[in-house]
């Protein structure tokens, strides 16, 4: 077994790197693959919260690197899944506690045992970002259809190319079809045209993501959500399957009906 | 063998001199790992002097790939030294530094004279141009004393600064400064002209704020006419002018 190491990054903060990492990891594990997630955001860890594993942390990434525990001891197994693990970040340290070569060494140890290693990169282009992309076989750039997020994504793609890790792959998160139809949001086509890299997924804006994130129960575990389905499709595409994109034009009526129903119904 | 290496270390020449933009460090020949180690040793030895320095590195014939240069830049930055330019005779190394957003040229020691000689000459024909055959993404910068030709897009957040003209065979959505040394005859051409900022000489272009999406995209050329930067569709221009 040789793992594929994917780093999820974005440049800008708050676009959904951690949400993407958690959901894609679970979707891959649902497919029966062996998956481990690494939280690369040392000092500002989040992934454990989103995955609902916060209360089980004993050792973290820095403990492994500084030799205070074995790698196995820092891996928290997600009991909801067959083979999903998390290596949490240290909360009381900072990015300089880890070097890019530490990350490469750590990931090499994981390669034989897993199918996928997902690294959740911190925002920014500094040390934490460099640590996170050092071991990557593939870089997944998450962006929102907003000018500032796309600008940062473009910068990241350039840096990834310069580190000879490119070409990166693209995930567009939080696409709001209502705004797109009114011409108030960049369309997915606009984003892809500018960034000019391969697209692996479009995740629509979906309130259930916020709800499930707060619960520590990633949205992909809830079968009926739009965002959950989109993340499952991303996982399938990463596995090399051809999954058609939802035709957004055709879905116009459907989306509208749905949002109307939601509005008149619940709240 | 270890001893042999130590003796060799001593022979590696590392010259440091002050220039307008900081320090210029010229590295001699030899195995790259040894040269790099020697450089870092010297910097550590005089860490107080180097703290906060802006450094241009002349690596001569050393061929450096992104991995080597990335390591060096990280190590330098750990010593508080910021690397802003890498000069080299090797095209591979030049390409690497361009990809990492580092300058590959440092401006001439006496820029005054350059400006005067350039503004006096009426013809730029026969000058060297720099060809960049890739998309320039946000954060990348291309600077040249001469002309710049890009085959690819110039994305928002990317910058081009040229002493002469700039030709973009692609979409221009970033910032371009042509005639950066004061040449008001410089022009900027692009297949799709939607820049964030455009400058020729010291003039700053007035750009249409919201380009009409419906409008058919045509190649355009920007130049100074009547003291202002104007845009013309390429098809309307007479050939040869």
Image (cartoon, coloured by chain):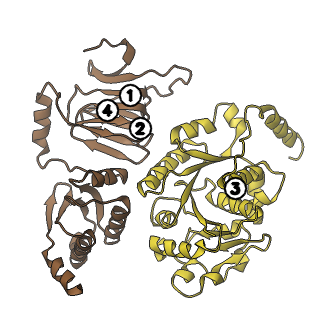
Front position in the image: A14 or B73: B73
**Which color has been applied to chain A in this rendered view?**
yellow
* Marks 3 and 1, how far apart at CA: 39 Å
Which of labels 1 and 4 is toward the front?
A: 1
Tell whether label 1 touches label 2 (CB within 8 Å).
yes
**Which tag, 2 or 1, sits closer to the chain's start?**
2
Image location of residue B16, percent across then percent down: 15, 66
Quadrant location, the C terminus of chain B? top left
Left or right: residue B149 versus residue B17 is right
Is disc 3 in the same subunit as disc 4?
A: no
Which of labels 3 and 1 is toward the front?
A: 3
User: Which secondary structure lies at badge 2?
Assistant: loop
Q: Which mark is residue B190?
A: 1
Image location of residue B175, percent across then percent down: 38, 37
Q: Residues within 10 Å of mark 2 (few under 14, many from 20)?
A: many
What residue is pinned by disc 3? A235
The quarter of the picture where residue B32 lies is bottom left
Query: In the figure, A39 relative to A200: above or below?
Result: below
- Name the residue at 17% across, 54% down: B20
- Name the residue at 78% across, 35% down: A251
* Marks 3 and 2, how far apart at CA: 32 Å
What residue is pinned by disc 2? B154
Q: Chain of mark 3?
A: A
What residue is pinned by disc 4? B199
Q: Which chain is brown?
A: B
Left or right: residue A3 versus residue B205 is right
* Marks 1 and 4, how far apart at CA: 14 Å
**Which tag, 4 or 2, sits closer to the chain's start?**
2
- Name the residue at 86% across, 46% down: A267
Left or right: residue B156 versus residue A234 is left
Which of labels 3 and 2 is toward the front?
A: 3
Q: Which mark is residue A116?
A: none
């Amino acid at each position: 077994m040789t793992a594929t190491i994917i780093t999820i990054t974005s440049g800008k903060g708050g676009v959904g790197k951690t949400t993407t990492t958690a959901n894609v990891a679970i979707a891959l594990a649902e497919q029966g693959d062996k998956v481990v997630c690494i939280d690369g955001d040392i000092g500002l860890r989040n992934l454990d919260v989103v995955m609902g594993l916060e209360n089980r942390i004993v050792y973290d990434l820095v403990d492994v690197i500084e030799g205070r525990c074995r790698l196995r001891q820092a891996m928290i197994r997600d009991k909801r899944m067959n083979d999903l693990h998390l290596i949490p970040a240290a909360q009381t340290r900072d990015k300089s506690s880890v070097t890019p070569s530490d990350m490469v060494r750590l990931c090499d140890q994981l390669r034989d045992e897993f199918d996928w290693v997902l690294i959740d990169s911190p925002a920014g282009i500094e040390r934490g970002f460099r640590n996170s992309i050092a071991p990557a076989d593939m870089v997944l750039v998450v962006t929102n259809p907003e000018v500032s997020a796309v600008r940062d994504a473009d910068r990241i793609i350039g840096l990834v190319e310069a580190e000879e890790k490119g070409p990166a792959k693209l995930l567009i998160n939080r696409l709001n079809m209502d705004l797109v139809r009114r011409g108030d949001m960049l369309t997915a086509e606009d984003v892809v045209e500018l960034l000019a890299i391969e697209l692996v997924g479009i995740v629509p804006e979906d309130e259930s993501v916020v709800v499930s994130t707060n619960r520590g129960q990633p949205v992909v575990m809830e079968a009926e959500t739009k965002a959950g389905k989109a993340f499952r499709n991303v996982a399938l595409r990463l596995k090399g399957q051809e999954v058609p994109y939802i035709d957004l034009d055709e879905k116009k009526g459907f989306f509208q009906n749905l949002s109307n129903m939601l509005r008149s119904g619940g709240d | 063998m270890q001893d042999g290496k130590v003796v060799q270390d001593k022979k590696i020449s590392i010259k440091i001199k002050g220039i307008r933009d900081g320090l210029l460090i010229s590295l001699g020949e030899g195995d790259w790992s040894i040269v790099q180690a020697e450089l870092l040793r010297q910097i550590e030895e005089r860490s107080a002097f180097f703290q906060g320095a802006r450094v241009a590195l002349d690596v001569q014939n050393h061929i450096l790939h992104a991995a080597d240069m990335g390591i060096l830049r990280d190590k330098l930055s750990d010593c508080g030294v910021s690397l802003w330019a890498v000069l080299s005779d090797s095209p591979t190394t030049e390409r690497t530094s361009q990809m990492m957003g580092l300058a590959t040229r440092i401006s001439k020691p006496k820029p005054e004279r350059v400006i005067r000689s350039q503004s006096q000459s009426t013809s730029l024909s026969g000058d060297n141009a720099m060809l960049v055959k890739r998309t320039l993404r946000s954060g990348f910068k291309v600077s040249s004393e001469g002309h710049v030709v890009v085959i690819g897009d110039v994305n928002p957040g990317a910058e081009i600064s040229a002493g002469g003209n700039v030709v973009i065979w692609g979409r221009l959505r970033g910032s371009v400064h042509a005639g950066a040394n004061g040449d008001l005859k410089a022009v900027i051409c692009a297949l799709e002209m939607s820049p964030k900022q455009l400058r020729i000489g010291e003039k700053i272009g007035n750009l249409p704020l919201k380009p009409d999406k419906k409008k058919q995209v045509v190649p355009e050329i920007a130049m100074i006419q009547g003291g202002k930067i104007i845009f013309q569709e390429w098809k309307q221009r007479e050939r040869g002018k």
